Image (cartoon, rainbow, N blue to C red):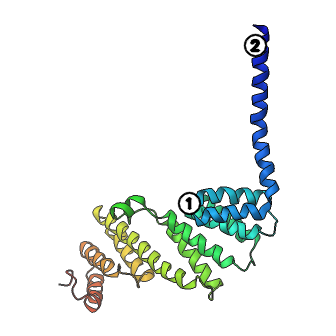
Amino acid sequence: MKIRLYALSLIGLIALGGCSSAPEKAIEEVELQGPQAIYAKAKTAMENGNFGGAAEILSDLDSRYPFGELSHQVQLDLIYSYYKSGDSAQALATIDRFIRLNPNHKDIDYAYFMRGLTNMEMDDNLFQSLFNIDRSDRDPSASREAFNDFRQLLDTFPESKYATDAQKRMVYIKTRLAKYEIAIARFYMRREAYVAAANRGQYVLEYYPDTGMVQEALEIMVSCYDQLGLDQLKANAIKILKLNYPESEFIL
């Protein structure tokens, strides 16, 4: 019995030794391949749509060779892989690190563009996308961040190949932000906070005059001024409605 127990213990130790050496062998194999071969595997994963797997490979490569000849391209691909795999937090962290360490890199405009895209993605709502549920009242802070990212891209790199796309996305974001102001205004109206609601409508006129929310903002202002007994302000809002939206039901 003692001999059998000793033999089993010895086998167990050998097995444990084999398990512990397996990761070390795997690491050695990776290191023997070199950064070029590892990067090629990451690119293959990206081409196959396996962005989560690509991110793991690229992250490991970035850790092992932080100053190699591929380091900048690895970080840029890592940003994209994080973005495509839905890991917005890691994408933003990697973008911020790249911008901080490489402010004069030839692809720095891409980093700013990807920051805007990632912040837009963070503002996306699954249920709204799947079931077309309007959630304009949700916090738009990520959209504001995205807007600032795209604006910084346009201000700093007006000739960037991403400039046209960034401009289009800024228009979309402005509509999103205007809808949020309208949603909050209606929230105030339901609680009879008419001054606050009218101010939200005025805010839309001042900051988002090129969106499709202007008519609704004016109509909110007419209703609020009517409730507050502010006849002159109400008349002014109706006048603007007549000039721009003659079909509005609020025109008396």
Alpha carbon separation for disc pair 1 and 2: 50 Å
Q: Position of residue 40 (x, y in %)?
A: 70, 65
Q: Earlier in the sequence, mark 1 or mark 2?
A: 2
Residue 172 placement: quadrant: bottom left
Q: Position of residue 41 (x, y in %)?
A: 68, 61
Q: Residue drawn 30% across and 66% down?
A: 189
Q: Is residue 126 left or right of residue 100?
A: left
Along the viewing direction, whichever of 13 and 213 lies nearer the viewer = 13
- Picture layout, residue 240 above or below residue 89: below
Along the viewing direction, whichever of 221 and 70 lies nearer the viewer = 70
Residue 134 placement: quadrant: bottom left
- Element under label 1? loop
Q: Which mark is residue 5?
A: 2
Residue 125 placement: quadrant: bottom left
**Mark whose residue sits in front, 1 or 2:** 2
- Picture layout, residue 217 above or below residue 1: below
Along the viewing direction, whichever of 105 and 144 lies nearer the viewer = 105
Q: Residue drawn 35% across and 81% down?
A: 212
Extreme residue toward the top, this view: 1
Q: Which mark is residue 85?
A: 1
Q: Position of residue 224 (x, y in %)?
A: 28, 73
- Element under label 2? helix
